[in-house]
Image (cartoon, rainbow, N blue to C red):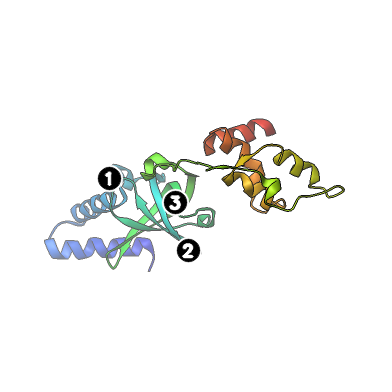
Amino acid sequence: MTAHRDLKRIIRERQQKTGESYTAARAHVMRVRATLLGCDAAALGTTEPMHVDAIVLKVNQRSARVRLLGEEVQVTFRSRDVWDLVPGHLATLAVEKRWTWRDDAYASGHIADKRIDLPKLGLVPLPLHGGELEDLRAVYEPYHDPDPYAAQWRKLTAKRRPSFERVLALNPNDNQGVRFCWEDVRNGRSWEETQQHEEAARA
């Protein structure tokens, strides 16, 4: 059943139940849907996508379960680019169609924007403390020339470091990309500031 046919069915069911005209029943149904989606009811009659912010709760192959900001209602959002989302993203959704099915709210469209926004998610970043200083040379096997990591090892172990910094010594292959953001973490830069710094460097 298409979204359009589903909408007409819901409107006609209300029309039969209340005795309203089709126009009045449609206006009521659209207002209810606007409330569920946290949108302006006047925008529902337009062809332009409505932009709403939502927290991504779960991502499936072709849809994402999201919660609209300021609402407790969860919506299943269908989009071809939903694979670009991860749980915890704050996403701006361009909603093109809306419908309900068996009392569940659905929407479809595309992802206009995605970002990490800790304040809007209601999260407080944990402080990064390194604990006691450690001499890595006394604990771990060193790298020697001509090993390509020998120079980096000497640099990392030139002074005692907090324990959380040992990740660079333990994982020199760095399959998680730690070394590319480590200086930003140490300097207290936010993720957004790091991205801006990288974009400026590429320009």
Q: Is residue 175 something that shows in the picture?
A: yes
Q: Amino acid at mark 1?
A: Ala
- In primary-sequence order, the first of circles 3 and 1 is 1
Work out which quarter of the rendered image holds the C terminus and state it. top right
- In primary-sequence order, the first of circles 2 and 1 is 1
Q: What crowding class fits label 2: few (fewer than 14 Cα within 10 Å), some (14-19), or many (20 or more)?
A: some
Q: Using the rendered view, name the quadrant where residue 70 is placed.
A: top left
The structure residue drawn at horizontal position 57% and vertical position 46%, both measured from the top left corner, is 164
Percent x, y of residue 58: 43, 59
Q: Amino acid at mark 3?
A: Gly
The structure residue drawn at horizontal position 53% and vertical position 39%, both measured from the top left corner, is 191
Residue on which the image places disc 2: 60
Q: How far apart are the two marked residues, 2 and 1, measured between alpha carbons?
A: 29 Å
Q: What crowding class fits label 1: few (fewer than 14 Cα within 10 Å), some (14-19), or many (20 or more)?
A: some
Q: Amino acid at mark 2?
A: Asn
Of 202 and 108, the residue lying toward us: 202
Percent x, y of residue 156: 70, 41
Q: Secondary structure at mark 2?
A: loop
Contact (CB < 8 A) between labels 2 and 1? no
State left or right for residue 198 relative to residue 13: right
Of 53 and 190, the residue lying toward us: 190
The structure residue drawn at horizontal position 34% and vertical position 49%, both measured from the top left corner, is 68
Of 136 and 170, the residue lying toward us: 136
Residue on which the image places disc 1: 41
Q: Which mark is residue 88?
A: 3
